[in-house]
Amino acid sequence: MQLIIEPGRTEKNYWKDLWRYRELFYILAWRDVKVRYKQTVIGVLWSVIRPLLAMLVFTIVFHKIAGLQSDTATPYAILVYTAMLPWQFFSTALTESSNSLIGNSNLISKVYFPRLIIPASAVISSFVDFLISFVILFALMIYYHYMPPLQILLLPVFLIFVFLTSFSLGLYLTAVNVKYRDFRYIIPFIVQFGLFISPVGFSSNIISEKWRLVYDLNPMVGVIDGFRWCICGEPFTHHTLVSISLSLIITFITLFFGIYYFRKTEKTFADII
């Protein structure tokens, strides 16, 4: 008797396969976390050091040197760190997921499972770093004697938001990266460029009306504005509503086309990789 394992022929069977292989999400995600900090001196503390150092640099440059101020009573360091948390999650998840298929080429070429699990597990492993980094935010609140507003209870909504944003872009980039290997050199530039056009070291309120619509087309603008509204109590203005709405629309459009392109090229991964 010969057993042949093959993917489902329909989309319905494919999503059933994702549920059947749900334990693989945990296995791959936990493996990615361990491999990332393997043979490092301070291990997972890098999850704390990276956003903390970035927060110090942005606070000095934008607050001390440039003289930018917070629109609320929130200390500027908390304002920056609040934005650094979703950005660090996004940049790490995007980088890891875009290279995830190539990094698991041996697994892909030997056994069947829904390939969607690989970039998804890379995003999940980045979420572990986010949770570790989030502890420092509470330490900053204690240090500055800052009490967050009640809407911090809505923070999980925006956390799901940044997860979908990272996953949608990561899906498309990892599929492109398999076919065009030199594309991996462009991804760090995309992440670096995105850092400077996102409201990490500054508030979105300083953007002039002339450039506001173009600025809001960056999906991370709505995510970061949402985080700051929940944690820093920034006013929920018309611009905040527009940025969040545009970010949601762009994220879901990107997610749709990302899944479509990934599924379209998925059957060729084993041959190309």
Image (cartoon, rainbow, N blue to C red):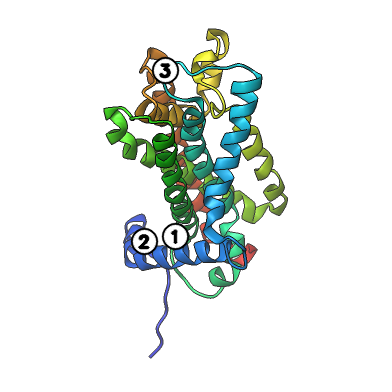
Characterize the local packing of mark 2: few (<14), some (14-19) or many (20 or more) Cα atoms within 10 angstroms.
Answer: some
User: For the point 37% across and 17% down, which residue is it?
Assistant: 235
Secondary structure under tag 3 reads: loop
The residue wearing badge 2 is 18
Q: Quadrant of the C terminus?
A: bottom right
Judging by the rendered image, the residue that carries numbered circle 1 is 117
Residue visible at 67% across and 44% down in the picture: 188
Secondary structure found at label 2: helix
The front one of 243 and 38 is 38
CA distance separating discs 2 and 1: 7 Å
Q: Do residues under tags 2 and 1 come within 8 Å of each other at their CB atoms?
A: yes
x then y, percent, for residue 82: 46, 33
Q: Amino acid at mark 2?
A: Leu
The span from disc 3 to disc 2 (Cα, nearest Å) is: 45 Å
Which quadrant of the view contains residue 39? bottom right
Residue under numbered circle 3: 72
Q: CA distance from mark 1 to mark 3?
A: 42 Å
**CB under 8 Å between discs 1 and 3:** no
- Local SS, label 1: helix
Q: Nearer the viewer, residue 93 or 86?
A: 86
In the picture shown, does residue 37 fall above or below 135? below
Q: Position of residue 101 (x, y in %)?
A: 57, 60
Which circle marks residue 212 in the picture? none
